Amino acid sequence: MFMSEYNHSLDAKGRLIIPQKFREQLGEGFVLSRGMDHCLNLYTREEWEKFTAKLASMPELSNPNGRKVTRFFIAGAEEMETDKQGRILIPQVLREFAHLTKEVVLAGVGSRIEIWDKDSWEAYNDYGDVDSLGRSLEQYQI
């Protein structure tokens, strides 16, 4: 399970250091994909296989939304591995999708790591109304 938050910077070539703790959990090869809320997702190969199996079970041929969801996640996905300095090169199309410029947040959120533009992360994750957040958990009996 991935957890914790790390702040890092993209270099001029679009390379990002993956924290040592995350590198150990990701293993030799992993997958980078678009994520919801204009972030990117890093999956272990095992978690990517589970995720894409769920996508494959959707009725995409007869359902325009199924086709769109499948394209969203799979068409922009890239197999990744870190270089000797523990960095990955994030493709330009994915940097643009997630609005990544310089400052980046890597957030472990269970089965994946989310990569966010720092300003977007801070704006999206404003926990000012924690009581409302807590009430939303009631439907899940948490």
Image (cartoon, helix red, strand yellow):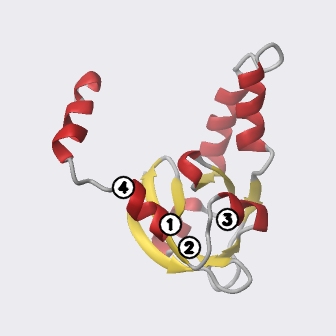
Does residue 3 appear in the picture of this structure?
no
Closest to the camera, between mark 1 and mark 4, is 4
The earlier-in-sequence mark between 1 and 4 is 1
The reply to whether callout 1 and callout 2 are in contact (CB within 8 Å) is yes
Percent across and percent down for residue 3 are: 39, 58
Residue position marked by numbered label 2 in the rendering: 18
Quarter residue 97 falls in:
bottom right
Does residue 45 appear in the picture of this structure?
yes
Helix, strand or loop at label 1? It is: helix
The earlier-in-sequence mark between 4 and 2 is 2
Closest to the camera, between mark 4 and mark 2, is 4
Closest to the camera, between mark 1 and mark 3, is 1
User: Where 21 sits versus 43, above or below?
Assistant: below
User: Where 119 sits versus 112, above or below?
Assistant: below
Q: Which circle marks residue 22 in the picture?
A: 1
User: Where 11 sits versus 61, above or below?
Assistant: below
Q: Which circle marks residue 28 in the picture?
A: 3
36 vs 47, nearest the viewer: 36
Residue position marked by numbered label 4 in the rendering: 125
Residue at mark 1 to residue at mark 2: CA–CA distance: 7 Å
Closest to the camera, between mark 3 and mark 2, is 2
Percent across and percent down for residue 94 are: 71, 60
